Image (spheres, rainbow, N blue to C red):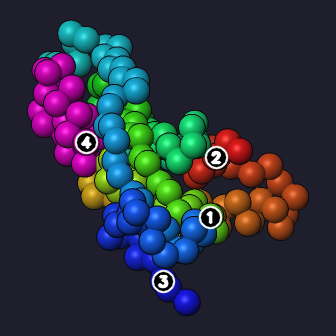
Amino acid sequence: MAESNPGNGAAAPADGAGSNSQADAGVVFNMQKVYVKDMSMEIPHAPAIFLETEPPSLETQLNIDAQNFSEALYELVVTATVTTRIKDRVAFLVEMRQAGIFEIRNFPQDQMDALLGIHCAGTLYPYLRANVADIVVRAGFPALHLPNVNFEAFYAQRLQQIEEAKRTGAEPPATTIIAPQH
């Protein structure tokens, strides 16, 4: 039995040689587009907040959503909400929704969720980090660089939260890792 290598991006020969089954056709994985789906910045206590000298505290929330919006095309959105406080006042709040369109064909369906939640999210995150850093500096604040994220651990944590909710009969987390449309 032939194995597909999901990382090689190889496609099946165009001459129709070999088997016609999708499993033998070869995996196709391409990032088609990267874009900012939504971005907002709030500075509720400007201009007085710029006079503060105390170091700020930082809180970051991260969510991932995906949908299969066309045959073999998936949109993945990584959302970061960054809240910076000085004392008990919000210095600024940034919400960034970094999105990408990925073409994925002939990939095992039982592994699709992990591919989107780990690999695709990890591909988009550097764009999100750069865009957040840019908007913060343009708003007049010192550079803010979000930390690296281990998306494999993030994915495992979200799966664990969903399983716990199923076991206890509670509502699953409001934001799912992946919610593909079929």
Q: Answer yes or no: do the residues labelled 1 and 4 have beta carbons within 8 Å?
A: no
Number of the front mark, 1 or 3:
3
- The secondary element bearing badge 3 is classed as loop
Real-space Cα distance between discs 2 and 1? 11 Å
Which mark is on residue 180?
2
Residue 8, compared with residue 176, is above or below; it is below
Q: Quadrant of residue 35?
A: top left
Find disc 1 in the rendering and name its residue.
Answer: 109
Residue in view at x 31 percent, y 37 percent = 34
- Percent position of residue 146, x then y: 26, 47
- Camera-side residue of 43 and 32: 32
Whichever of callouts 1 and 3 sits on the residue coming sooner in the sequence is 3
Tell how many labels.
Answer: 4
Residue extent of the magenta highlight:
126-146
Residue in view at x 39 percent, y 60 percent = 14
Which mark is on residue 3?
3
Find disc 4 in the rendering and name its residue.
Answer: 127
Whichever of callouts 3 and 2 sits on the residue coming sooner in the sequence is 3
- Camera-side residue of 1 and 123: 1
Disc 1 crowd, CA 10 A, few/some/many (<14, 14-19, 20+): few
Whichever of callouts 2 and 4 sits on the residue coming sooner in the sequence is 4
Whether residue 30 is in magenta: the answer is no
Number of the front mark, 3 or 2:
3
